[in-house]
Image (spheres, rainbow, N blue to C red):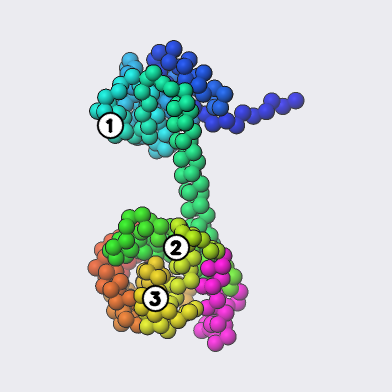
């Protein structure tokens, strides 16, 4: 009969006093798997080998202090995300402040209260789980966006470039860092509706006829349906972008003929970022335009296709835009002025 696998989360307890480790063991052993270390060097060795979900760390230890151990953990990319809670007799504000400055997520003073220790550990493990779920969701969003690009004979680099362009423009337009980051992560979904467009239309080498163009225009509404309705957050931003990035400032766009500031700001931003990257990139049916020619088109379409204020802000940010374009250039492709 196979022994059942213990799937409880793993904690590393670090203290040079065996009595303190015993106290923590009694508090936590029912809910978690536990590892023990009595000095900083051993703690670092075990953290690297076992990858615990959380570390409870004393400060005053011989050899390496807890502060030094925490700093060493945060300097290693594979270990830096492990939350560290200091458990120490040092109760001064300066000591606590230093603990947070070296990367700890919490600070518990001795003698410890069992309910407090359990609550703090549970809270920080929950936060780690939430962050992991958020990162997973972002990866799904980005890869679904890339899937649409591959269907459209793209490499996937287009969605990376235009997403970063969108963030630069969003910050220039006055959006907060958090809102601009949401836009960066939502923008890859702008053309996800192309997944629902027949290949005969999507990959047609020549010009689309009127009926085919009507089919192609459906991709914005298909994309909005794929993403779904959401009251707030990243997916709400993604849906607004998918539905509105083909609207035009003068009202001649699709699907709803919105004009001016009736078009959500996210859609207006992504429209510029998307068109600029498409123009300055090689496509199966065209050579890459020069940056100068692409900027000239943005100016010509300012007030017709594009928000005039955003066009000016985009042009002002060209050094940052071109740096992004060079960083994620297609193989064998370089930016031309």
Circle 1/circle 3 CB separation < 8 Å: no
Q: Which residue was labeled with disc 2? A: 237
Q: What percent of the width, then of the height, locates residue 176?
A: 32, 57
Q: Residues within 10 Å of mark 1 (few under 14, many from 20)?
A: few
Estimate the x, y position of residue 60 in percent, counting from the top left. Answer: 32, 18
In percent of the image, x 37 and y 32: which residue is there?
Answer: 106
The secondary structure type at the circle numbered 2 is helix
Q: Residues within 10 Å of mark 3 (few under 14, many from 20)?
A: few
Along the viewing direction, whichever of 82 and 129 lies nearer the viewer: 129
Q: Earlier in the sequence, mark 1 or mark 3?
A: 1
Q: Is residue 331 above or below residue 11?
A: below
Residue placed furthest toward the bottom: 210
Q: Is residue 315 magenta?
A: no
Front residue (pair 281, 119): 119
Say which quarter of the image contains residue 172.
Answer: bottom left
The x, y position of residue 81, in whole percent, is 42, 38
Q: Is residue 249 visible?
A: yes
Q: Residue at x 33, y 76 (%)?
A: 307
Image quarter of the N terminus: top right
Circle 3 is placed at which residue position?
A: 262
Q: Which residues are magenta?
A: 198-226
Answer with left or right where residue 21 lies relative to residue 297: right
Instruction: Note whether 19 is above or below 165 in the view shown.
Output: above
Looking at the image, which residue is at 55% across and 86% down?
Answer: 209
Q: Quadrant of the C terminus?
A: bottom left
Mark sitting earlier along the chain (1/2): 1
Q: Is residue 106 above or below residue 136?
A: above
Element at badge 1? helix
User: Which residue was labeled with disc 1?
Assistant: 97
- Secondary structure of the residue carrying numbered label 3: helix
First in residue order: circle 3 vs circle 2: 2
């Amino acid at each position: 009969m196979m022994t059942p696998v213990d799937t409880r989360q793993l904690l590393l307890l670090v203290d040079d006093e065996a009595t303190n480790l015993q106290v923590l063991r009694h508090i936590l052993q029912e809910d978690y798997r536990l590892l023990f270390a009595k000095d900083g060097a051993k703690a670092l060795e075990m953290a690297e080998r076992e990858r615990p979900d959380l570390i409870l760390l004393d400060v005053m230890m011989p050899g390496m202090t807890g502060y030094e151990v925490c700093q060493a953990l945060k300097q290693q990319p594979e270990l830096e995300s492990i939350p560290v809670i200091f458990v120490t007799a040092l109760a001064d504000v300066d000591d606590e402040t230093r603990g947070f400055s070296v990367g700890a997520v919490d600070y518990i003073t001795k003698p410890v209260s069992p309910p407090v220790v359990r609550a703090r550990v549970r809270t920080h493990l929950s936060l780690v789980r939430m962050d992991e779920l958020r990162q997973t969701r972002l990866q799904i969003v980005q890869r679904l966006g890339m899937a649409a690009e591959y269907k459209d004979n793209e490499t996937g680099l287009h969605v990376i470039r235009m997403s970063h362009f969108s963030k630069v423009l969003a910050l220039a337009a006055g959006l907060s860092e958090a809102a601009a980051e949401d836009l960066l992560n939502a923008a890859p979904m702008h053309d996800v509706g192309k997944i629902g467009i027949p290949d005969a239309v999507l990959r047609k080498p020549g010009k689309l006829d009127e009926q085919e163009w009507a089919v192609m225009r459906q991709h914005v509404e298909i994309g909005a349906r794929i993403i779904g309705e959401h009251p707030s957050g990243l997916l709400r931003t993604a849906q607004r972008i998918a539905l509105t990035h083909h609207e035009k400032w003068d009202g001649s766009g699709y699907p709803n003929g919105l004009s001016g500031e009736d078009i959500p700001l996210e859609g207006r931003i992504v429209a510029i970022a998307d068109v600029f990257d498409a123009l300055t990139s090689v496509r199966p049916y065209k050579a890459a335009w020069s940056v100068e020619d692409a900027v000239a088109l943005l100016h010509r379409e300012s007030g017709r296709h594009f928000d005039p204020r955003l066009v000016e802000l985009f042009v002002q940010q060209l050094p940052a835009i071109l740096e992004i374009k060079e960083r994620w250039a297609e193989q064998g492709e370089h930016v031309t002025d």
